[in-house]
Image (tube, coloured by chain):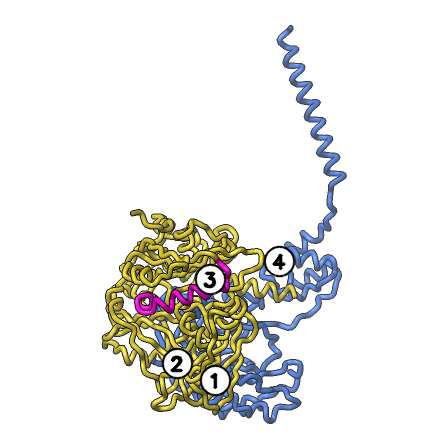
Chain colours: A blue, B yellow
Amino acid sequence: MAPYLNIIIAVTFMAGFGLLLASVLVLANRRLAVYEDPKIDEVEELLPHANCGACGTAGCRAFAEKLVAGELQPGKCTVNTPEMNQVIANFLGVELGSQEKITARLACAGGSNVAKRHGNYQGVDSCRAAALVSGGGKGCAWGCLGLGDCKEVCDFDAIFMDKHELPQVINDLCTACGDCVDICPRDLFSLQPLSHKLWVACKNLEKGEAAEDECRVACNACGRCALDAPEELISINNNLAVIDYSKNNLASQIAIERCPTGAIVWFDKGIQKGQRAKKIIRKEALPVE
Amino acid sequence: MLLHTFNHGVHPPDFKSLTNGLPIRRLPFAASLIVPLSQHAGKPSTPLVKVGEEVVRGQPIAAADGFVSVPQHAPASGRIKAIQLMPSARGPKTDCFIVDVYQAATQQELYEYTHDIDKMSAEEITQAVQDAGMVGLGGAAFPTHVKMKPPPDHHVDTLVANGCECEPYLTCDHRIMLEQPQNLLQGIRLIKKALGVEQAIIGIEDNKKDAAEILQQHLQENDNIRIQVVKTKYPQGAEKMLIKSLLGREVPPGSFPSAVGVSVFNVGTLAQIGELLPHGRGVIERVVTVSGPGVNKPGNYLVPVGTPVEFLLKHAGVTKDAHEVILGGPMMGMSVSALDVPVTKAMSGMVVLNKDDPDLKKGQTQPCIRCGYCVEACPMQLNPSMLGMMASASMYEDMQREYHLNDCFECGSCSYVCPSNIPLVQYFRIAKSVNRDMAAKNQGDAQ
């Protein structure tokens, strides 16, 4: 057999085989193709890629799918700037949809200068670890442990620890993703719209002196705030003042004026306490008892 | 002779000679006792008495709320001063009875009724154990009667009495075996009858051979109770380890010992059952080892439940340098932040360490060098090194899914041997706690 015949057979076979496989691929591409709206990719490009979940979906891609399907409105994204959300709205030809700014808020004001400590915690620098070792040494069993798990978990640097070892939320940076809500071993964080200005910064379930003994700014369940609150806006539930935010439009600064310890505060350009709330002069941390 | 044991484990110095020669001594009543409504795993009990009411020693003051719960009894005669939130050793404040004890209150039990234990049926024994408020006195505080009713598809054939007491310092179980062998054997006979099992084995570490001898002397002919000496090694007293050592059976991950036909009870629990059941009494006191370099008069004290830790320490006397109080043993125990926490049913010991104690001066945490000591130490054959690295990367879910985090029972062997001083167990506790929260949250979302 002539040597060139081998080459011809090989080339022909490979070419034929290639054509066969190519046609299978072409067929598969036609028959098995799933149509995906190209707009989803484009919308996803316009989203911030934070995958924070604040919009309630599993990430930016899922949010983009919902947007294109018209199930959600671009305004739901709290991480994007309003201008970018407007771009998305224009691109899709839908309403921007508005959402009130929501931020994380801490229900504790017991910094190291006002809340007692009974023991020195030594160990891993984490609130959750401290909470598992006999409560971490803080006198108040409900209060902030101040080791900054929330600061660590925040992807947006929206939380910093102040000089009294209490986390502070920077409203402009907070995207309300809810990571700090999940990580806090004492469940002190919750997501609140900015319009919820009246706020109980305490979770202590003890009463009177028992509460105030451990922390100078604790809610001692005296009930003065609830007494003249309009239409039961504030009630004392389980030794703690509870605000019914469905009646938020009735909230006023009267309640903070009633509070003797300053556990109820007014969030508006900083934290306001009532005139008659006891003044906290101490700047340095209380000694460990 | 080759002693029975399990694989891996560690050999910490045991410091048992401080207290193992000292007989159990009774402690007086504190002026007021703090009796928590929740001293057990499961639902807290519901109060039976009101504030201001007088109670007598031994009287039930709270009833069990459901099956996985136990009643509470008044540890001393006195008046209920309040039912209020008090700190617990674990941290969260829980509802407690404050009992103002009458001066010169008698140590005699004033509330009891007689059971004819020979005629009791299995159900009656189980019910009587619940009525006694009995929980695992070894430290787990799991209601004992729940263990006496294994799931119907589990056939239990062996009762194991756990007399290992592998934690350093603790000697309360050792003393109970030496001083109350009759009660212990009586308890085993009762539980054997309730469970309907053929054989019972008492597992004792070989540093407590005297206890084994005494128990052997008290055995009766048709008891079918075997006393088995096992090797002294930590954590021999963990129930899964002990089952492996004694019977060679391995409890599958995530299931109870009844899955391999075994029920394990602590010897302290069994001795109390043997003592209390014939008289229908409740658990109102327990033996607590108070030991450690920071204690002046170490010993084994019979302490009424609800005695504040501070009172106990005052009686045992602490040195000037006393720095840290650990409830339980030094390996698995928990240091406390407040001394007004009460002694509970599950508290087996108290260790006080001095300020300059070398054990408190662990050096700076260094990076993992992958030496593998922890892998060699882990009695559950886990990989603590890998788990630790995953924990520092917050990969908590993967730790459970791929490296069986939940099989870890936090014995502390890995942290003990780690030359880099990595607080591995603490990492695992964080991871477990986060996983628990997430599971609860996902369940809440699903509903």
CB atoms of marks 1 and 2 within 8 Å: no
Q: CA distance from mark 4 to mark 2?
A: 41 Å
Would you place residue B377 above or below residue B16 in this image? above
Q: What crowding class fits label 2: few (fewer than 14 Cα within 10 Å), some (14-19), or many (20 or more)? A: many
What is the three-letter code of the residue carrying label 3? Lys
Observer-side mark, 1 or 2, equals 1
In the rendering, which numbered label is found on residue A224? Answer: none
In the rendering, which numbered label is found on residue A59? Answer: 4
What is the three-letter code of the residue carrying label 4? Gly
- Given the image, what chain letter belongs to the residue carrying mark 1? B
- In x, y percent, where is residue B419? 31, 54
What is the three-letter code of the residue carrying label 1? Gln
Determine if the magenta segment contains residue B128: no
CB atoms of marks 2 and 3 within 8 Å: no
Residue A43 relative to residue B421: left or right: right
The residue sitting at 46% across, 74% down in the picture is: B39
Q: Secondary structure at mark 1?
A: strand
Q: Which residues are magenta?
A: B175-197
Observer-side mark, 1 or 4, equals 1
Q: Secondary structure at mark 2?
A: loop
Q: What crowding class fits label 3: few (fewer than 14 Cα within 10 Å), some (14-19), or many (20 or more)? A: many
Q: Are marks 2 and 3 on the same chain?
A: no
- Given the image, what chain letter belongs to the residue carrying mark 4? A
Q: Which residue carries the number 2 mark?
A: A116
Q: Which residue carries the number 3 mark?
A: B192
The residue sitting at 25% across, 70% down in the picture is: B22
